[in-house]
Image: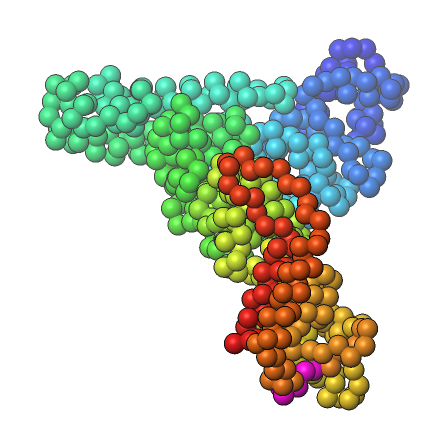
Amino acid sequence: MNRNQITHLLNTFAQYVRCFTLKELTDFADSDSDTETLKHALLADSRFAQLEERDSNQKHYISNRSLFKWFCRLSIRLARAKQTRLDKRQLALLMSSLRIDDRWNSPPTEAIQFGNHLGFLAPAYTTDQYVLPIAHILSFMPHNLSEFTTSRIMEAISLDTIDLNWSFEHLAQESIQNGFSHFNENECYVIKAREGILTGKKMTLEQVGVHEGVTRQRVNQIESKLWRRLRHPVRVRDFSTALICSVISKQGNLIVPKDSPERFLSSFLAKCVGVPQAEFPYSKKLILGASPKDVTLPKSTGVIPEDIDTDSIANRLESQRQLCIIGNDLKSLAENIAQFRRKRLTKGQKAYLALRAIGRPAHCSEITGVYNSFFPDQPYTEHNLHAVLGREQYGVVWIGIRSTFALREWGYQHPSKGLFDAVTEIVQEKYEDTSQPVPFTVIVAEMGKRRQVVNPTSLTIATYCNQNLRRVSKDSFIPKERSEETQEQISGEELDRILREFEKEGNKRPMEKEPPSISGKESQPSRFGHALLSLKRKLTFLRS
């Protein structure tokens, strides 16, 4: 085959409404045609898209024009059924109508990319699901208007390549100009000024009246009359075409930032066609195809991490099914909600999140470091955060070790008794059961059943320095009888003698040299002095 014959053959298949294989192309050609030559010519022609099935080596081809028209017809069907979301299996089943021989088990990647580029479908936030923005916008229009709009677009666009953004933007601007061509200059000024299309800010009735030299009441009458004309079934076709082309050029993005130049124009087009629009809370973004009741925030679950977690919020927004938003855009909205809720967290909730991020019992100093890394705008000192943690809010509990906290959801509990009382109780119970002195190893084992975490040093002090216990051997203890607490009577002379001997021993002890105080004040007493003072107080108490 010569080049002219190949071109004629490809022109013929460019009008074919379904997929075709290379074998079908060669069978349609002359018997002496070269298969490799036809294949290279087909792959080099930008008018065709190659559709390849993952589970099969068989390749199909379809013209961009036919694939575009198929997506347009699919959007019309789904808009009529009010179905703007499909899963992977449903999409593959629908796309199988493009084939004659068999069906696809999964939608071809190239077809999904084509539809995604033109805004017909896009991945939802949920895996293996797709949203269809064009079908969603068409679902709010009367059926005859939606069919006319898609037919007009199919006739106006030349689909030689997939890169069609300029063509759709041009068609949108052309349709807007045609829509306003039905009105005179003053009428166009009134409606554009009132809708913010002129300056990016809506003008008041009084401001428009001053410019036009009429009263604000007259401007209101003109505006009301203009809106009745704008929504006329014939004139609204231009604005519906402009709206759909605008959505296609933005690849199906239905979110318009409030501070963007196109915000007022998109809002005006949606208002003309009757497509609802609403501002999403705390995001400063306008969503086309959403009513105010559709953009309500997901209610709090009562679990702090879920309320401020982006994925959790996005999943709950997705489950509502009222919003037809691309997955990446939905995640962006969820991040805005999460940021808003993080700013409203209390100090107790922030402390809980810091401890939860550590994932284990931690000292207050470590929790403070994580807290300040999470919330650098409002740093906290260890002393202040210790006071917050000590309130034991939101499941935070002190576990019996100094300045160490954990979470109740991890299985930790606040100790019901102090360490000294717990040791006394263990010795009393074991002594009553066995009538034998209780070894220290048994106390350690029993304490492990009552507390998840125990400081060995604290447990040793609570055992060996416990006034309610009496040590009967090196490491064994029995409860002290109450009579033992009162039978130790020491005379006043004996107490004085003990104190004098203790002081005498202290004087014989060599004094440690201490550097002079910078402030000129006397230095603090040594540890020996503290011990002497403590013993004096104890003996004085016994004496009294």
Residue closer to the observer: 88 or 43: 88
Q: Residue at x 80, y 86 (%)?
A: 436
Q: Viewed as shown, does residue 465 lie left or right of 150? A: right
Horizontal and vertical percent position of residue 144: 43, 39
Residue closer to the observer: 242 or 392: 392
Q: Indicate whether 367 appears above or below 156.
A: below
Q: Residue at x 40, y 23 (%)?
A: 261
Q: Residue at x 52, y 76 (%)?
A: 544
Query: In the picture, residue 47 is in which quadrant?
Result: top right
Q: Indicate whether 2 appears above or below 389.
A: above
Residue 325 seen in render: no
Q: Quadrant of the N terminus?
A: top right
Residue closer to the observer: 392 or 205: 392
Q: Which residues are magenta?
A: 479-483
Horizontal and vertical percent position of residue 522: 53, 43
Residue 381 seen in render: yes
Q: Residue at x 75, y 77 (%)?
A: 471
| Residue extending furthest toward the top | 3
Horizontal and vertical percent position of residue 243: 43, 30
